[in-house]
Amino acid sequence: MNIAFSPCPNDTFVFHAWVHRLLEGAPELNVTYADIDKTNYWAARREGPEVMKISYAALPYVIDDYELIPCGGALGRGCGPLVLSKNGGSDPSRLAGKTVAVPSDKSTAYLLFRLWAAQKIPGGPGKITVMPFHEIMPAVRDGKIDAGLVIHEARFTYKEYDLDKVADLGDWWEEDTGFPIPLGAIIARRSLGMKASLTEWIRESVEFAWANPDASMDYVMEHAQEMSKEVARSHIDLYVNEFTRGLGEDGYAAVESLLGRAADEGLIPAFDLQKLRD
């Protein structure tokens, strides 16, 4: 079976057991390691592997052809994107009319930013520029842009760039809705007709990872992009949780809330939310 997920520690931790054929009865995996921008693009074009991890923000564009697998993804509390600036403090009104860099304009982080900005930035930000993730914090530090939207390990490293946190969009979302924040989703082509089996295999891989937390570390670090073990472990602890094992009603409600609100704001296409569960 062909699958694509990111080289980030949470994904390699989750899929380690399946990739290394440690699950009885699960098919062998042919893995493509790809950042979520690439998998979002493949899904939109109905290309790429039959199973992929994409952003929840990209799901409405492909929901007719791909089904949501209710485990293996990233959804949780205390793990939201950050809005950063230099010498800007925590007053979001300072970003009115300013240039903000984002790693993607088709991401959950960007949807959250737009929903947050509509509440917090009078008149909204000025120019939005898409920039590779690893370039954002240096660009803010060097004054090339006014603020940046960052994800993942930047939560642990932004102070090294002498930057200020304007907002934690995860905290804002949780306070505003009471729900955890949806980030990355596992999807599979509906034509496969294997939702139940995929759910079982991914859940078994998650449970193996938790039962054997050190077994995957060599594999995780092989793909961790010069990240320290400490940061990799923090990354895993933050993004792999009970919602990774299974969305449950709270998880589904969080996804429906995010995508329903974004559709109401015209940020994504409107669609039948029941398709998330079909």
Image (cartoon, rainbow, N blue to C red):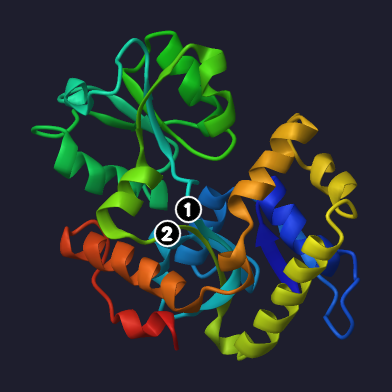
Asked if 71 appears above or below 44 in the picture, the reply is: below
Q: Residue at x 79, y 34 (%)?
A: 229
Q: Secondary structure at mark 2?
A: loop
Q: Residues within 10 Å of mark 1 (few under 14, many from 20)?
A: some
Instruction: Please give left or right for residue 186 compared with residue 167 in the image.
Output: right
Q: Which mark is residue 180?
A: 2
> Residue 77, labelled with which disc?
1
Q: Secondary structure at mark 1?
A: loop
Residue at screen point 91% across, 71% down: 22
Q: Residues within 10 Å of mark 2 (few under 14, many from 20)?
A: many
Quadrant containing the N terminus is bottom right
Locate the C terminus by quadrant.
Answer: bottom left
Q: Amino acid at mark 2?
A: Pro
Q: Is residue 9 left or right of residue 23?
A: left
Q: Amino acid at mark 1?
A: Arg
If you read the primary sequence from the N terminus, does the residue marked by circle 2 or circle 1 appear first?
1
Q: Position of residue 147 (x, y in %)?
A: 34, 23
Camera sees residue 114? yes
Relative to 111, residue 251 above or below: below
Residue 14, how many percent across, how many down? 73, 61
Is there CB contact under 8 Å for labels 2 and 1?
yes
Q: Position of residue 268 (x, y in %)?
A: 27, 61
